[in-house]
Every structure is written in C-alpha cells, then in structure tokens.
Image (tube, coloured by chain):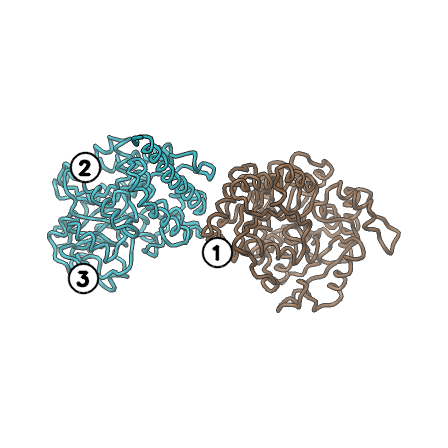
Chain colours: A cyan, B brown
Amino acid sequence: MPSLCLYFQVHQPCRLRRYSFFDVGHVHDYEDEAENHRILDRVAQKCYLPANALLLKLIEEQQGKFRVAFSLSGVVLDQIERRRPDVLESFRRLAATGCVEFLNETDSHSLAFLFSPREFRAQVLLHRKRIRTLFGKDGRTFRHTELIYSNDLAKAVDKLGYAVILAEGTEKILGRRSPNQVYHPVGCGKLKLLLRNYRLSDDVAFRFSEAAWSEHPLTAEKYAHWLHRIGGEAAVVNLFMDYETFGEHQWRETGIFEFLSALPGEILRHPDFFFQTPAEVAASHDPAGKIDCPGFISWADAERDMTAWLGNAMQQDAARSLYGLESAVRRRKDEGIFKTWRMLQTSDHFYYMCTKWFSDGDVHRYFNPFESPYEAYINYMNILDDLSQSLKQKKECIHDRDAQTLPL
Amino acid sequence: MFGWEFPPRMSGGLGTACFGMTKALAGLGHRITFVLPHAGETSAAPFLVLVSASGISLSGTDPEEGETELLRRLTVHPLPALLSPYLSADRYRDLFLSGEGRFRDTAAVYGPDLIAEVTRYGRAAGAVARRLSFEIIHAHDWMTAPAALLARRISGKPFILHVHSLEYDRSGENVNHQILEIEREGLGKADRIIAVSHRTKRMIVERYGIPQEKISVIYNAVTRAEAQRVYRVERKGDRKMVLFLGRITFQKGPDYFVEAAARVLQVLPDVTFVMAGAGNMMGQMIERVGELGIGNRFHFTGFLQGEEIERIFSMSDLYVMPSVSEPFGISPLEAMMYDVPVILSRQSGVAEILKHALKVDFWDVREMAAKIIAVLKHPVLAGEMAEKAREELLKIRWETAAELIAEIYREAAASAPAP
C-alpha cells in the first residue's frame, strides 16, 4: 500500500543592492528592497496565490484524502509578513484544513551547520517557534537548506527532537536500493529518513514543459499511471519540489495548474494509493534499512553535493569571512546588526558566486541577479567589509560613552 | 587575401588577426596568396626570406610540425607601400615627410597623402590579380578595399570584406570623410561582409545602411604560442601591477585608465600602473599623470614588440582594456594566456564572448576603479578568474573561425555570377 508524500519548498532570498567599494564606510543598508518587492509580488501573483487556492480546493474536494507539506523559509516569511498578509492568510487557510504539514528548517535558509553549530541550533529553534506561532503546530519534520544532508546533520536534528528528516535519494547513499522506502540514519535514535525520488520529482519540476522530452506532454493520467506501476515494491514515493514549479518555473501556459488539479483524482483512482505528509509517513512505516552518509549531499545540480555553494575559492573565502564575524556580532548585542548578519547567511548569496555553471550558460543563470559570479563575490565582500567596519566602529563609541558616565 | 604584417610584431590588432586566421585557413587546406604592403628596405628582408626558402617557420623559431606543410600553401606578395593598420592621415604625412620610405630601386614615389597612397596601392595590389588564379578575394579593413574592388573587376571573383574596425571606432564622431567614403564604398560593393563582433555588425547596419543579411559575425581568436612562452610568470607578491597595453589613442580610452588609476591609488597607494604602447595621446597622458601627482606610480614603456609583450604580461597582476569603441579586442585574450585576469570595456566585441572577465562601461571611472581594487584586494578572485579564463580560452580557436570563414567562401563562390 504505497503512500504518496508531496512536499513543496517555499523560499525567496533577500537580494542585495549593488554595493560598490566606495560605499564602504558610508552606506549601511544592503538590501535591494525595490527588487525584492517586485519579485515577491510577481511570485505571489503567478504562484503562491493561485497554487494555494487550487490546493485548498483540491483538499476540500478530496475530503481529507489529499494531503501535502510545505516548508517556508524564515527569509520568505519575513517578506510575506511584511508585505503580503494575503499570502500569509492563504497559507493559514491551508493549515486550518488539518491536511497540511509545515516543516522546519534553518530560519535563514543557511549553511550555518557547516560553520557554527551554535548558530545552526539557534536558527532551527527560531524557525520552529515561528512556525508554531503562525500555524499552530510544532514541527515534526526537518529539512535542511537545499536538502543538504550528512550523518552529522542527522544526529544534530535527532537531538533537537525531530521525528523525520528529508534528503535527496541519490545513488551515492542508496547504492542499489530504492528511494521509495523509509530509512533510518546511522547513529540516530528515533529519527527516520525520507528520500526524494528525484526522477519523478524532476519530471514535473524540470521536464514538464520541455518539448524535446520523450514524455512530453505530461498529463496527470500518464504520471499517475507511472506511480501506480511502482506500486507493490514501494512503501512511499517522495515527491519533493520547489513550490514555484507551479506558475513560475513552469508558466501557467504550460498547463501545470491543470496537471496539478487533475493529479490527486488520477492518483486516488487506484484504491491502494493514498497521500500522507512526511510526519504521517514516518509514524506509519518502519525503516527498511540504514543510510550511511559520511559526506554532504544535496539536491543541487547534477553533482548533488556542496559545490554549488562552496565549490570555489571565492565562495569559501566569503563564507569563512562571514562566519568569522560571529563573535563580534554576538558581542555587539545589536538586533539590527544581528538580523543583517543572519540575512547575509542565506545560501543564495553563495550560489550566485558559483562558477561551474557559468561556462555552460546553464538555466541557473535565470536566477542570478548579478552579471557574473565575480560581481556577486565582489558585491558581497564589499558589504562584509562595511559590516565588519561597523562592528569595529561602534565599539569605540560605546567606550567613549562609558568613559563619559564614569564618576570623576 | 589582402592583408597586413606577416608575421605580426605587435599585440592584438589587424596583423595578429590576419596571421592567426591565415594559418588556420591554410591548415584546412586552402591555398592563400597573401598580398601586403611593406615599406623600406629593412622590413623587406624577412618577407623575402619567408618566400624564398620553405622550411623557415612562420613564427620565427624552428618550424613546428605541420608548419612546413602550411608554408607550401602560402604565397606572400609584398608590395611597396607606406601603409600599416590604423594609420591616420596625420601620421601618414609624418612618415611621408620623414623620408622613412622611399623606393630604393625605382623612381616611383609613395602617394603624397594617405588617400592617395591607398588609391595607388589599390591599383598596384589589385593588378596582382591579373597574374594569379583564385576563387575568392578576402580583404581586411578599408585600406584594402580599393585593391579588392580592382581585383574583382579583373577576375570576376567574389569580394569578401572583413571588418576589424570602422572609422567611427577609430575616430568617434570626428571622422575623416574621405576615409569614410572609401569604407562605405567597400562595404556597399562587397559581395559579403565579415564582422568581428555583433557590435561591429550593428554599426555597419545602422551607420552605413548595409542590409544585415550581407553580414556574418565571426569572432577573432588568439594564437597559441606555447612554444614561445619564454617567460614564466614573474609576479611577486608585494607590488601589484596593472597593465594597459594598446595604442595610446582616443579609441582605446587611455584617459579613463589614468583617471581610474588615480582613484585606486587613493585607496591602495602601493600599486604600479603601466601604459604600454605609443600613440597620439601619449603626451597628453604623461601630462595628466603629472597633474594628478601619480607620476611615481606610473610607467610609460613606449611601443613594445615581440618578446617584450610577453614579458610585460607575465609581470602583470591585472589587464585593463578601457576601450571607447572596440570592434573585437584580441589583447585581453593574450593576457588571459598569461593567467592575467582582465577587466573589459562593455563597449567591445570581445566582451560578447568572454564570461570570465569583469566588465565595465568605459566612462564609469568609479566602477572601473572599484573593480581594479577588488581584483587586487582579493587574490581568490584573481585566481578564480584566471583559472576559469584559461579554460574558456581553450574554446576560442582560429580553427573555429577558419571553418566559419570557409563556409562563407563556399556560399560566395556558389552564388557568384558566371564570368
């Protein structure tokens, strides 16, 4: 009796303004607010609002049999809370159906785990609290930034009390085993592991509108048929994808909304199939085996490793410089500076400095607001320069103030 | 082929482009008769040696494998003429008056001014067509257009004009109208045009009214000279060196380089700026450097050739090409071969194909300075750019350009009217 587990990732970074070397020491706000607004509005209009409305309708139609999960990064939540209460409301309505699970992740959608365990833990707890406040439930399921995963990460997440963690179903950790089972990460207590079936997920997320694809056009009927065919051997089929698949990456004109609309019905035709959220999958299945993942994997690019964010010297330099500021930032005890430092941790900033796709003129270029990865690096380092100068400066002022208040 | 300087002595430029292209075309099996101007006795000698003794390498050192084969397909016809690429009317007058070139053996004399000389060369070079059999006429830039037109009249063969620069590039809005007319006539009457970048093609369409179907874009490339790479990278850690290499003339934006340098030196006082080359703005640049008080951080090397160019690249930490209007720009590719990161003007053809270079609008001195500072301050940036640029270079080959040119030859020959 295989279950279908659908999870959608919702995230938008805070884009940085063009920050010149000559701004250092003079300009202290780093965000490109106009651009962030523009993009948020566009994505809300093309994706969040129509897709949420559709899912709500489908959930009501299927009377509880259609169930899905979301993870909303703290970064996108910041923007939605500030600018688009209507979008927040539409997610709340989904939460109220009782058929939607909200996952936890690092609030800043960051790589903190690789640099500062303390910061990682703080971001997870912050996100957990926000999700509980907004949607009423404590997170049971954890997904890390871009599905980055390793044994050590699993252990840390286990200690934080989660029931299930998500990762990429890559051959690197599966060997010849199938991703369509529930697994148990080595060295962990109760934590269970769900692995993304990347072929079937990417069929929708990437290949859906590719005219050259042998399976184009993909109808809900055909796709449901593939899922039904897996049937007997599978415990669960995990379809994890970016929510912007619906309306942004795949435009409305491709028929993606019609596809989504028909999908639950087509899948549920088969009496043995049913939908579950990740937490439900974990609660109702025993692990089929152990997964050992000593290094890091992710869902990014063909390599499915860390090279998208930390593959070249510029990225490593930028990340080291950023996390090198941690103690100074904490000592400062300035909420504005702390929030800024957190905002700069979003993984996208490092993604923009990636040089491996640049030569091939890949589809990833669509997402990069910079003309080249070099510009992204220069821009980021200028900003860090200013931030670290600010951290040094104010300290001196505080000392002066204290000196003035000392009794004579 | 009506071309220039074989082999070339300088960096970048028309001569370098013709040389690389011709070698590659010969490598594809085409037989090329190369007609070019040369002046004075001293420069005649190497050409004669080239022509008369096969087995002497085109690159000046021992022949590489396959070069002797190439040489068999190449015939070089030097003709006396006081012409060189990018010659301006004023510079021509200086040369003419200095008596630098007088025919040794005959009583004939060079034209009294640039236009007259181009016309005279046109008659002499075009007439070479009477003695030869060929399928295609391939001419490079405006000075060879009259020769090509005459050659076509004589032979009936199609004429392809290869545009490496336009008068608007060389002189901005201060064009020489006689030169412009010859250029316009050449572009109008050519059977096909090859432009070295989309930027140049657009200019030809917009400013000369040529239909775009007639123009193909074929990017230049750079010649691998690994065998000649005598200088290991010589860079030392402490004093960083930023290089400008090119003609010191309006088109190349030397003034923007100087202004940016001044800004950089306010922040990073320990950087050396080198302006390698010569040209009609040199005096002005030297004065401006003095005015800005940065003379002790600035070097003017004068015109460099051959090995000196390789040496200066190997000493540089950064190469900047601030051109006001550059149809292509081969010099940055040469810098990249020496692992020197480059900053390019967006107003250049080469910016269309290079991904691993920083780009800036030539007039944006502040941004130019900011990018220079970034490369000098962050060794990881310089390192990543240089490494990726080296990979990118592997795909920029004369062989690719030659194949595209050969395709144009085929099309032109096929649609040529029967004699």
Depth check, front residue: A353 or B85: A353
Instruction: Give the residue at mark 3.
Output: A290
Q: Is residue B318 above or below residue A187?
A: above
* Residue B68 seen in the figure: no
With B103 as the anchor, is A46 left or right in this view?
left
Secondary structure found at label 2: helix
Residue bearing the label numbered 1: B387
The chain carrying label 2 is: A
Instruction: Give the Cα distance between marks 1 and 2.
Output: 51 Å
Residue A6 location, x and y as percent? 21, 47
Q: Secondary structure at mark 3?
A: strand
Q: Decide which of tag 2 and tag 3 comes sooner along the chain.
A: 2
Distance Cα–Cα, label 1 vs label 3: 41 Å
Q: Quadrant of residue B134?
A: bottom right
Check disc 1 and report its element: helix, strand or loop: helix
Quarter of the image containing the C terminus of chain A?
top left
Q: Are marks 2 and 3 on the same chain?
A: yes
Q: Position of residue B379 (x, y in %)?
A: 47, 52
Disc 2 target residue:
A56
